[in-house]
Image (cartoon, rainbow, N blue to C red):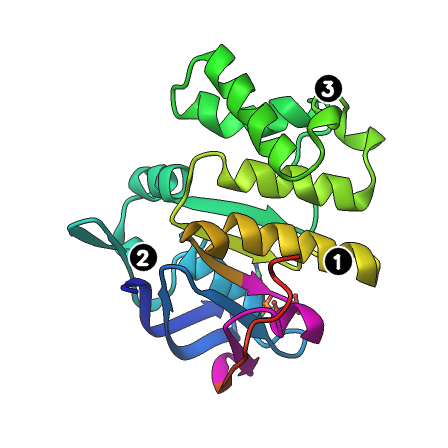
Amino acid sequence: MHNLIEARGLFKDFGPTRALRGVGLTVAAGEAVAIMGPSGSGKTTLLHCLAGIETPGAGQVLFSRVGDTVDVAALSDRRRGELRRTSFGFVFQQGLLLPELTAGENVALPLLLLGARRADAEAEARRLLDLLGIGDKVGARIGELSGGQQQRVAISRAQASQPAVVFADEPTGALDSVTSAEVMSALLASTVGSGRALVVVTHDASVAARCDRTLHMADGTIVEMSTSVRAGDAS
Ligand SMILES: Nc1ncnc2c1ncn2[C@@H]1O[C@H](COP(=O)(O)OP(=O)(O)OP(=O)(O)O)[C@@H](O)[C@H]1O
């Protein structure tokens, strides 16, 4: 599988705090990569730099699409926003779903932003929610759903635009262990199971164990990389 993302020599400072100090990594199509490490070690900052949410102070984030490679870090804000909408999906612990909208409307939104017709976007949203076993919640508002159901909505929404890479930050952080395992199964099935890459920041070793590789961070650098035999992602 080819590399979708190749980061080289990433540095990021927040005032006097050096959050990243020379991080390099690759992420291949169809690969799940976990990022672990103590609080403050730079995991979220790295994820945000890879996803074009933050720009690094130095270094490159090369993203390869068919016949084309762009340096995410060097794009204008507008082009970076466009790249995020077309090529990346996001699942965060909380905060990304719009509570005043229904589950179906939340999932349809990225498609509407990309210019889809409302009926098509709604049908696709329903299909994606069905795939994750919550098609019956299409008309429910976010606040009416359990934490696990909300994360399934977030996963459905993250894959609506058929992105090449899904970035997840503590996607199971607020869930009990059984629900966490189920949500992780859904996340893996909808990403690596469909040839996409998944980059997931987690404190949970059982989440990381289900990824192909785990990058361990400390003090703004990757201090160790371990590979695992993915288990149980077909469940
Ligand atoms: N917007 C910001 N402004 C100032 N400092 C920041 C900002 N974002 C991150 N930092 C600092 O950069 C360092 C790395 O933060 P980051 O959030 O990447 O760590 P993390 O490993 O994801 O931590 P956690 O596990 O607690 O989420 C920390 O010292 C943090 O305080």
Mark closer to the chain start, 3 or 1: 3
Q: Which residues are magenta?
A: 200-222
Q: Position of residue 194 (x, y in %)?
A: 45, 49
Identify which residue is drawn at 60% across, 58% down: 234
- Could you tell me if the residues under marks 3 and 1 are in contact, i.e. CB atoms within 8 Å? no
Q: Left or right: 67 with respect to 173?
A: left
Determine which residue is flagged by label 1. 180
Above or below 71: residue 139 = above
Furthest residue toward bottom: 223
Identify which residue is drawn at 38% across, 49% down: 164
The answer to which image quadrant residue 79 occupies is top left
Q: Relative to the observer, which residue lies in front, 80 or 91?
A: 91
Mark closer to the chain start, 3 or 2: 2
Please name the amino acid that badge 3 sits on.
Gly
The answer to whether any part of residue 143 appears in the image is yes
Q: Left or right: 203 with respect to 63?
A: right
Q: Which mark is residue 73?
A: 2
Quick check: is the Cβ at mark 2 less than 8 Å away from ligand 1?
A: no
- Could you tell me if the residues under marks 1 and 2 are in contact, i.e. CB atoms within 8 Å? no
Q: 10 Å neighbourhood of mark 2: few (<14), some, or many (≥20)?
A: many
Q: Position of residue 101 (x, y in %)?
A: 69, 22
| Secondary structure found at label 3 | loop
Q: 10 Å neighbourhood of mark 3: few (<14), some, or many (≥20)?
A: few
Q: Relative to the observer, which residue lies in front, 116 or 55?
A: 116
Determine which residue is flagged by label 3. 139
Mark closer to the chain start, 1 or 2: 2
Furthest residue toward left: 67
Q: 10 Å neighbourhood of mark 1: few (<14), some, or many (≥20)?
A: many
Q: Left or right: 180 with respect to 191?
A: right
Q: How many marks?
A: 3
Please name the amino acid that badge 1 sits on.
Ser
Quick check: is the Cβ at mark 1 less than 8 Å away from ligand 1?
A: no
